[in-house]
Amino acid sequence: MIRLETRVVVIGGGATGTAVLRDLAMRGVEAVLVERGNLAEGTSGNFHGLLHSGGRYAVKDPPAAEECIHENAILRRIAPQAIEDTGGFFVVLTDEDEAFLPRFLEGCRQVGIPTEVLSGSQALQEEPALSPQVRYAVTVPDASIDGWTLCIGSVKAAKEYGAKVFLYTPVTKILRQGDRVVGIEAVDRSSGNEYEIRAEYVINATGPWTTKTARLAGLEVPMALDYGTMVVLNGRPVRRAINRCRPPTDGDIVVPVGTAIVLGTTSVPIQDPDDFCIQEWEIDLLLEEAIKMVPVVEEMGVQRYYAAVRPLYKPPTEGAEGQREVSRAFYVLDHEELDGLGGLITVTGGKVTTCRLMAEKTVDLVCAKMGIQAPCRTHLEPLPPA
């Protein structure tokens, strides 16, 4: 057993965990990150690649929309190497879409998302591959973002400030002494080395695996997990991210990523983030819905398909029935306050787009508990090239 000491251990190497590590390191807090696989191996490396403007949530989840538009601007400034500024359209095709349009525009206005309404003919001039049935298109500042580049940049920055990272090193135990967490045990799957890492605080930033990780400390964190399937097509007939102008539902987005487009996404409830299977109906539905927005999709070849699990936190008091109704906002859980167990903080929910803000609020809490007065600077310093 190799014994180490640090001030904070971060569990999870996705966008949020790596952003937490960077923020800690930049504030002068000694920190170690442990990840059971590679960086961005979970949701952060398997989502549809959209840097949200917040438009998708402007009507039904304004707090999440406001977080998205705020962080959209910051990530463009600090991580341009991870972002392609595609822009985005919300397209109106039917009477139902048109009825939703005023609500959409008002929701965007209230949370500060800049929009412009184009006529159908103007939209087709900008994006000729759109359906000729398009009545209006609303511009929003969507973009595409590379989760791997973002995570690698955060880790590189954190290491420059002295942080350490252990990949392929799953946590096997969260160590407790009475009513306080005091560290972790983990095993390096590559070398077989066993580690005991003592720390003042442990941060659970494991996304869909939040519940499994919390159970290592004897706690239950209620998650409302679902997975979403995405289909990748060869070619890029549109320059912008294309959304249907309607309440979020299955198959309502096309995201240009690199030389391809990604069709998304479904919402299928699951119990275990390590146990799910893409179903044929999902692929058929995504293709069918995308064809309505971009008819040329019907002639394109499927390159591959994949899925990711959404880390949706459902507070015990929240009464939403469907997974689409669960807020996409994030939560920072102080287990000393909630469960009487000190030394453990959970950050969950949110989006890749909001990872930096999630980290800021998490580290604010940890620093306050540790008596550290150091302001967040992650919105000011650019990430190093990955």
Image (tube, rainbow, N blue to C red):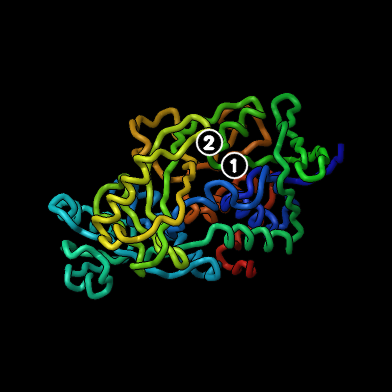
Q: Quadrant of residue 119?
A: bottom left
Quarter of the image containing the C terminus? bottom right
How far across and down, in percent of the image, does residue 330 sit?
Answer: 48, 45
Please indicate whether residue 119 sits to the left or right of residue 142 in the image: left
Q: Which mark is residue 327?
A: none
Amino acid carrying label 1: it is Thr
Who is closer to the viewer here, 143 or 297?
Answer: 297
x then y, percent, for residue 189: 75, 41
* Furthest residue in direction left, as rendered: 95
Q: Could you tell me if residue 328 is visible in this image?
A: yes
Which amino acid does the dot numbered 2 rest on? Answer: Pro
Q: Is residue 339 left or right of residue 343?
A: left
Q: Residues within 10 Å of mark 1 (few under 14, many from 20)?
A: many
- Asked whether residue 68 appears in the rendered view, the answer is no
Please give the residue where the numbered disc 2 appears in the rendered image.
Answer: 273
**Picture residue at 69% right of the left edge, 47% below the top:** 371
Crowdedness of circle 2 by 10 Å Cα count: few (<14), some, many (20+)?
many
Q: Which mark is residue 206?
A: 1
Farthest-out residue, bottom: 125
Task: Answer with left or right where residue 42 lies relative to residue 374.
Answer: left
The CA distance from mark 1 to mark 2 is 11 Å
Q: Earlier in the sequence, mark 1 or mark 2?
A: 1
Residue beneath the point at 47% across and 45% down: 307
Q: Nearer the viewer, residue 253 or 8?
A: 253
Contact flag, marks 1 and 2 (Cβ < 8 Å): no
Q: Is residue 3 left or right of residue 13?
A: right
Q: Secondary structure at mark 2?
A: loop
Locate residue 52, reporting x and y percent.
Answer: 41, 58
Viewer-proximal residue among 183 and 155: 155
